[in-house]
Amino acid sequence: MKLETLTDLYIHQLKDLHSAEKQLLKALPKMAKAATSKKLRAGFEKHLEETKEHALRLETILSSHQQTTRGPKCKAMEGLVEEGAEIIEEEADAEVRDAGLICAAQKVEHYEIASYGCARTFAELIGDKAGMKLLQKTLNEEGATDKKLSELAMSEINISAND
């Protein structure tokens, strides 16, 4: 895809985000299964359901621009998912693994927050008000997930891992 306009870049970003969300749909169940903390497992399972919605929102926006979701694989998410998989495979104490899973998940959240923020700004600038609203909703949810992960890490998981 040749990027000549901000709209081209916007569509490219939406497709990249869709690829990222699809990769997460495969990774989150594995992370939930690897978590020993019930709260962390529940958090991953809740975010899996949100991620399904995020992918659907992206499909809606792309469809409104007469675009498909087809595009290159998101390399950034591929690397982040791989890091999470490495944590799962490490020989580690359960609490330490949970702390590592939170770390891996927050790296994903921060990537998504940056990416959705850019896409939302592009939507605003090109006048895609419906897309902007959907992207802002997802951005809010990603931020809330990051905050919940931080709270869980600081109130329980990291403390247990440090014992």
Image (spheres, rainbow, N blue to C red):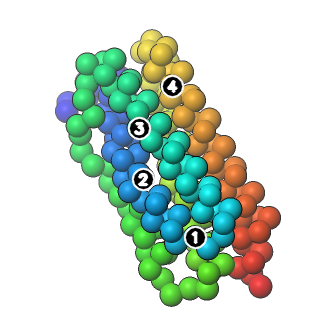
Front position among marks 1 and 4: 1
Disc ID at residue 35: 1
Q: Residue at x 42, y 53 (%)?
A: 24
Distance in Å between CA atoms under marks 1 and 4: 30 Å
Lower sequence index among marks 1 and 2: 2
Q: Residue at x 66, y 57 (%)?
A: 149
Side of 42 where 24 appears, left or right: left
Residue 155: percent from left, percent from top = 80, 64
Lower sequence index among marks 1 and 4: 1
SS at mark 1?
A: loop
Residue 94: percent from left, percent from top = 62, 81
Q: Residue at x 32, y 36 (%)?
A: 15
Distance in Å between CA atoms under marks 4 and 2: 19 Å
| Amino acid identity at mark 4 | Leu
For label 4, the residue is 134
| Amino acid identity at mark 1 | Ala
SS at mark 4?
A: helix
Front position among marks 1 and 2: 1
Q: Vertical placement of 89 versus 83: above or below? A: below
Q: Vertical placement of 53 versus 161: above or below? A: above
For label 2, the residue is 24
For label 3, the residue is 55
Lower sequence index among marks 3 and 1: 1
Q: Vertical placement of 48 versus 29: above or below? A: above
